[in-house]
Image (spheres, grey):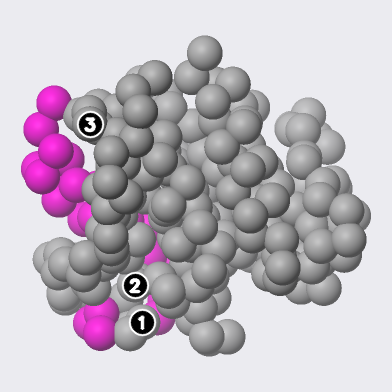
Amino acid sequence: MNSPRKAPTFETISINGPAGKLECLKLESALPETRGIALVAHPNPLEGGTFTNKIVTTLAKTLSRLGYVAYCPNLRGVGNSEGEHAYGKEEPDDMAAVLAQARAENPGVSGLVLSGFSFGTYVQSQFRQRLSDDEVEGMILIGPSVTRQAFPNVPADTIIIHGEQDEVVDLHRVFDWARPQQLPVIVVPGVGHFFHGRLTQLADLVDREWRIRLL
């Protein structure tokens, strides 16, 4: 794999969404050649979740180092994004608009990663159902909010990472959701929902799991 170039920095862009303008953080690939697009979805905005969430930016930076250009939108009604929060029912439409612009800005780049944290995992899991297997390299779900929404099934190769001591989404409930699908779950001991003090470990886990996939 190519060596990283000078680390890119986040820029704020505007995207035309179905409910109005979407504010979006964009982080270019840290490698000389962009291998794919990464969409990163934020946690519940009713509890303060935005695109500046530390797990969101950690995912974006990690995927940038792996060669992806990352797009982290504030979904409808969040921050300076127009529209109203729709509790995850219409936010996949926002993700579709972000993907359309990302593809327009990166012609010839075909790889796609869908990633998210908490509420963002629900948005991405719904959006994944609209896409073909040929379009998506894989998904990365951190702290999937399976107790808060009617959470859909996800592909068998989805990377799922959850804290052992998650105080928002009980680990046992994640296993209840994953078990019928035979989905592996990576459990990080001693960690709560927000991975406080363990973001470096989270980044290392994502990096390791995704590099295995790229082999």
Judge left or right: residue 23 versus residue 61.
Answer: left
- Residue closest to the eye, 128 or 89: 128
Note whether residue 112 is visible. Answer: no
Closer mark to the observer between disc 2 and disc 3:
3
Q: Is residue 37 magenta?
A: no
Secondary structure type for disc 2: loop
**CB under 8 Å between discs 2 and 1:** yes
Q: Quick check: is 98 in the magenta stretch?
A: yes
Q: Position of residue 127 (x, y in %)?
A: 41, 48
Q: Residue at x 71, y 70 (%)?
A: 196
Whether residue 72 is visible to the viewer of this picture, yes or no, is yes
Q: Are marks 2 and 3 in contact (CB under 8 Å)?
A: no
Provide the residue designation for mark 3: 32
Q: Measured from the top left, where is residue 29 in percent x and y?
A: 28, 42
Quadrant of residue 91 in the image? bottom left
What residue range appears in magenta? Answer: 80-108
According to the image, label 1 marks what residue? 78
- Dot 1 alpha-carbon crowd within 10 angstroms: few under 14, some 14 to 19, many 20 or more: many
The residue shown at (13%, 26%) is 108
Q: Which numbered disc flags the more N-terminal residue, 2 or 3?
A: 3
Q: Mark 2 points at which residue?
A: 74
Q: Residue 113 carries which label?
A: none
Q: Which percent across, then down, holds residue 89?
A: 44, 66
Which residue is depicted at the point 40% across and 40% down?
A: 65
Residue type indicated by callout 3:
Pro
Alpha-carbon span between mark 2 and mark 3: 27 Å
Q: Is mark 1 on a helix, strand or loop?
A: loop
Q: What element carries label 3?
A: loop
Q: In this view, does 167 lie above or below 31?
A: below
Q: Where residue 4 sits: x, y (%)?
A: 34, 35
